[in-house]
Image (spheres, rainbow, N blue to C red):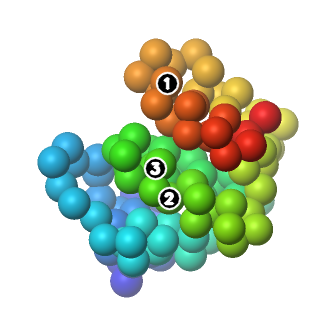
Amino acid sequence: MAANVYGVMSMSGPSQPKVEGEEWSDERIQSFLDLIPRDDINPDFFVLKEAYQYMTPEFFARFVPYFVEAGRDISARNPDGVTLLERMSGFAKAAPYIEVLRKNGAQ
């Protein structure tokens, strides 16, 4: 296990930048569920944010159902009271991620 850019201990995957054309195993995608924030941020918001930052839209689309099936809160809020969906709304490149979140019940 290695620390990612936030100093969070994680398995292979979360510490890697987005790379187009690379294939990720289900195990690598699911490893994001094990991420733990070092501060007081909502753990579910943290995991979703990390997945958004490190996964391509295709991998994110594979990840979110695992997240929901694990009973995690897809509409979790950061310390400012903002959901990931709300945070991403102003970014044009976030459109495929926003679609995945909405299809999986994010508000």
Name the amino acid, label 1.
Answer: Ala
Q: Earlier in the sequence, mark 3 or mark 1?
A: 3
**Residue in the image at 56% along x and 31% along y:** 99
Q: Between residues 8 and 45, which one lies in front from this camera angle?
A: 45
Q: Which residue is mark 3?
A: 60
Q: Is residue 41 above or below residue 4?
A: above
- 70 vs 64, left or right, is right
Task: Pick whichever, 32 or 79, lies toward us.
Answer: 32
Determine the residue positioned at 48% across, 71% down: 30
The answer for how far apart the CA atoms under marks 2 and 3 are is 5 Å
Circle 1 Cα neighbour tier, 10 Å, few/some/many (<14 / 14–19 / ≥20): some
* 77 vs 25: above or below: above
Image check: 13 left or right of 69? left
Sort mark 2 into few (<14), some (14-19) or many (20+) by Cα contacts within 10 Å: many
**Residues at circles 3 and 1 in contact by the CB criterion of under 8 Å:** no
What residue type is disc 3 on? Phe
Q: Quadrant of residue 46?
A: bottom right
Q: Picture coordinates of residue 31 (x, y %)?
A: 46, 74
Vertical comparison of 47 with 85: above or below: below
Query: Which quadrant, please, contains the N terminus?
Result: bottom left
**Quarter of the image that includes the C terminus:** top right
Task: List x then y, in percent, for residue 68.
Answer: 68, 61
N-terminal of the two: label 1 or label 2? Answer: 2
What residue would you read off at disc 1? 95
Residue 63's mark?
2
Q: Is residue 8 left or right of residue 72?
A: left
Choose top left, top right, bottom left or bottom right for residue 20. top left
Q: Is residue 75 visible?
A: yes
Label 3: state its secondary structure: helix
Tag 2–tag 3 contact (CB < 8 Å): yes
Q: How far, Cα to Cα, is label 1 from label 2? A: 16 Å
Q: Residue at x 83, y 36 (%)?
A: 81
